[in-house]
Amino acid sequence: MKPVIGVTCDYDLNENRSQVFSGYYESIIRAGGIPLLVPCAEGLSPEDLIGRFDGLLLTGGQDIDPYLYGEEPHQDIGSVYPARDRLEIGLCKMAAEAGIPVLGICKGLQVMNVAMGGTLIQDIRSALGGKALCHSQKAPGFIGMHDVHISEGSKLRSIFNSDKLRVNSFHHQAIKEVGGPLVITAGAGDGVPEAAESTSHRFFVGVQWHPERMVSKAPEMLKLFEALVREAGGHR
């Protein structure tokens, strides 16, 4: 049987609906898995969900409520939806404890870091000033805007078999203090962390860019989803 991958949904606060970009679940299908969409809904708990999938994909979306990592909100913080944050952080913790493979994308990487006890840069521009690269591009998502340099010996390096990738960029926050077993495994030229993975888990990998938006023009980005599905199959 194909492995089932839980795919978390974003929440549109104006329309009061869960939603997810099709590139996430289409990439899971192309990689050989079955996506199971996880809506943002009051009454759903991590305990209700964790046993229903073999892998977990944490998707992008709004900023994480800084209260959840012990900080007050910066003046340039974006929209937050704490109910989603609590559900995803809980799912991430339970997946880590159960050895379920996890892939985090953009906000998903930040969720992984907060779940493991880390903190976030609430606004990159404010933190780095004029030294910051463009991390909130206006170009279409299939276009790479800057390079990331991948650490030797990392799982990410083995997935792409390369020490450098050209990636897109749609975020204004990033990892600040690294949580628990995580280590930074890729970075942009301005020093902003672009990926992290756990040294204590078989597959617990997050990236700051959006591979699901790039696969149509950069098919090598599918390798991340293939790695998740492959590891989820092994976990099953």
Image: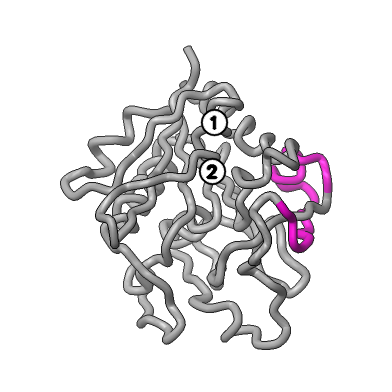
What residue is shown at x 47% (from left), y 12% (from top)? 1
Residue at numbered disc 2: 103
Residue 127 colored in magenta in the image: no
Question: Tags 2 and 1 in contact by the CB under 8 Å rule?
Answer: no
Q: Nearer the viewer, residue 55 or 82?
A: 82
Q: Amino acid at mark 2?
A: Leu
Q: Amino acid at mark 1?
A: Ile
Q: CA distance from mark 2 to mark 1?
A: 11 Å
Q: Position of residue 235 (x, y in %)?
A: 49, 25
What residue is shown at x 59% (from left), y 62% (from top)? 170
What residue is shown at x 54% (from left), y 56% (from top)? 106
Q: Which quadrant of the figure has residue 204? A: top right
Residue 144 colored in magenta in the image: yes
Q: Secondary structure at mark 1?
A: helix
Mark 2 or 1 closer to N-term? 1
Lateral position of residue 196 relative to residue 46, left or right? right
Q: How many marks?
A: 2
Lateral position of residue 44 relative to residue 208, left or right? left
Lateral position of residue 131 relative to residue 55, left or right? right
Q: Name above or below for residue 32 compared with residue 22.
A: above
Return the residue found at the far top. 1
Q: Name above or below for residue 104 compared with residue 169.
A: above
Mark 2 surroundings within 10 Å by alpha-carbon count, few (fewer than 14), some (14 through 19), many (20 or more): many
Q: Secondary structure at mark 2?
A: strand
Return the residue found at the far left. 43
Q: Position of residue 182 (x, y in %)?
A: 57, 56
Q: Position of residue 87 (x, y in %)?
A: 30, 51
Q: Which residues are magenta?
A: 143-162
Q: Name above or below for residue 86 compared with residue 44.
A: below
Q: In the rendering, which numbered label is found on residue 28?
A: 1
